[in-house]
Amino acid sequence: FPSQIFWLVVTFAVLFVVLWRVAGPRLAGVIGAGLACFALAGAGVGIGLVFGNYLAGALRNPGAAASQTANMFLGVALCEATGLFGLVIAFIILFG
C-alpha cells in the first residue's frame, strides 16, 4: 500500500511537470478567463434582484407599476452590461 501511494505521487508529479511546460501559459489564461466570468454570475443575481424588487413594488402598489417599468429595464440593462463586459474580458484573455 505505501508503494502504491509513492507511485501515485510520482505519476502526478510527472504529469504536473509535463503539463506545466506544455500548457502553462495557456492554463493561466484559461484560469483568468474563468475568473472574469464571475461577472456573469453577478449579472444574473443583479437581474434577479431588480425583477424581484419590481414585482414586490408592483404587488404593493399596482397603480404605480406602469410608471416604474422604464426604471426596471434600465436596471436590467445596467446589470446585463456588467456581465457582458466580463464576458468580453474573458474572450480577450482567451483569444487576444
Image (spheres, rainbow, N blue to C red):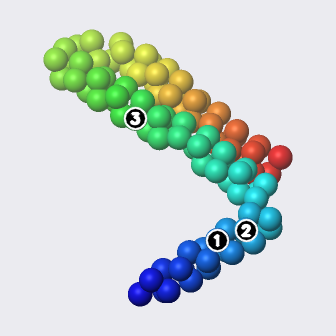
Q: What's under tag 3, amino acid-wise?
A: Val
Can you identify the residue that label 2 sits on?
17
Determine contact: label 2, label 1, CB under 8 Å: yes
Q: What's under tag 1, amino acid-wise?
A: Ala
Mark 1 to mark 3 CA distance (whole Å): 40 Å
Q: Residue at x 56, y 83 (%)?
A: 7
Numbered disc in front, either 2 or 3: 2
Answer left or right for 86 relative to 45. Answer: right
Mark 2 to mark 1 CA distance (whole Å): 6 Å
Mark sitting on residue 63: none
Q: Residue at x 56, y 75 (%)?
A: 9
Does residue 8 lie above or below 79 as drawn?
A: below
Answer left or right for 68 relative to 7. Answer: left
Can you identify the residue that label 1 sits on?
13
Q: What's under tag 2, amino acid-wise?
A: Val
Q: Element type at marker 3?
A: helix
Q: Earlier in the sequence, mark 1 or mark 3?
A: 1
Determine contact: label 1, label 3, CB under 8 Å: no
Residue 10 picture location, percent across and down: 61, 77
Q: Nearer the viewer, residue 67 or 88?
A: 88
Answer left or right for 61 relative to 6. Answer: left
10 Å neighbourhood of mark 2: few (<14), some, or many (≥20)? few
